[in-house]
Image: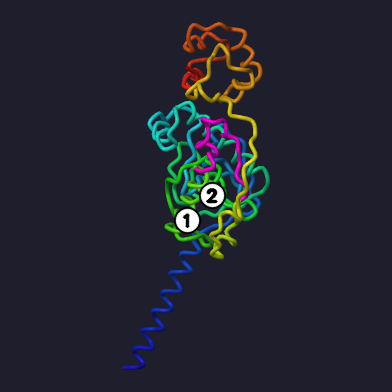
Amino acid sequence: MHALKRFLLLLFCILATSLVRGAEDKWLTYENCQLLPNPSNDGDSFHVRAGGKEYIFRLYFVDTPETDASIPERVAEQATYFGVSIPQTLQIGLEAERFTRAKLARPFTVVTSKEDARGRSHLPRYFAFVEMNGESLAEDLVANGLARVYGEKAQGPQTRAPAAETQQLLQLERRAKAQKLGGWGIGTGRLNTRAAAIPGPSAARSGTDSFSAFFHSPTPTPAAAVPAGSHGYLDPNSASAEALQNLPGIGPVLAQRIIAARPFQSADELRRVPGIGPAKYAVLRPYFR
């Protein structure tokens, strides 16, 4: 009888070990990844060269605002979350894309189980964790007010349990709100203001909860392209060339064409500016009052 119990216990341990090993084996870690330029890249979804192949990866746990109005229901949902206008939401999305591009300018690490993230590209899109020198990109985005805590959750081989990670992100969000960083401060010109670096996963797993040790008072940087006090909209007759160039698809040449075409009776007349076709007009129109 005792021999049977020992045999069953041994069998249980073998099965449990196999299950744990199987869960770990499904995760792939790509070191020294490179961000690939692509018009579809945004703050939480981007093309990456990893292991000699091109992939699209989508961050777990977070959602950055859209960079254009092509999915109006999603943009409206994001605007409600941040409590801002549609144009301001798009501006937050553009800032999140710039933030991610800067963070991933150097080689970084991707950990993925290749869970389907349901992208719209011909390439498959997979959910992933992304780290730069031990810093979590998802946590950095939330800490700087550039993403909402939302979306698919998972526990990677070296990450917190989903409930614990969600709580960590919500704490970072509360601090970003209190400091009016990113989208939480866009109405006061603090979209570009940054938080200090947050601890890497090893420090976070050690149980340290003193957030004051990881943040300092942010230093203001130039205000967002959308001016405060205008409810987030640009005036096509007075927007500066710099402000216009912060909008998607507008470079120095097109900005000067817009300025040269003034005055406009309404923003609808942007359609008569050379270089603004129907598709570009649909993207730009929500930014103007």
- Residue 208: image quadrant is bottom right
Tell me the kind of residue under disc 2.
Glu
- Residue sticking out furthest to the left: 1
Q: Secondary structure at mark 2?
A: helix
Q: Amino acid at mark 1?
A: Glu
Residue 172, percent across and down?
Answer: 51, 49
Q: Is residue 93 left or right of residue 152?
A: right
Q: Which residues are magenta?
A: 178-197
Q: Is residue 32 left or right of residue 189?
A: right
Going from the N terminus, do you reach mark 1 or mark 2 first? 2
Please give the count of numbered marks on the rendered protein. 2
Residue located 52% across and 54% down the image: 112
Give me the C-alpha separation between circle 1 and circle 2: 9 Å
Q: Which mark is residue 165?
A: 1
Across and down, in percent, residue 10 comes to 41, 83
The structure's colour scheme is: rainbow
Q: Which mark is residue 139?
A: 2
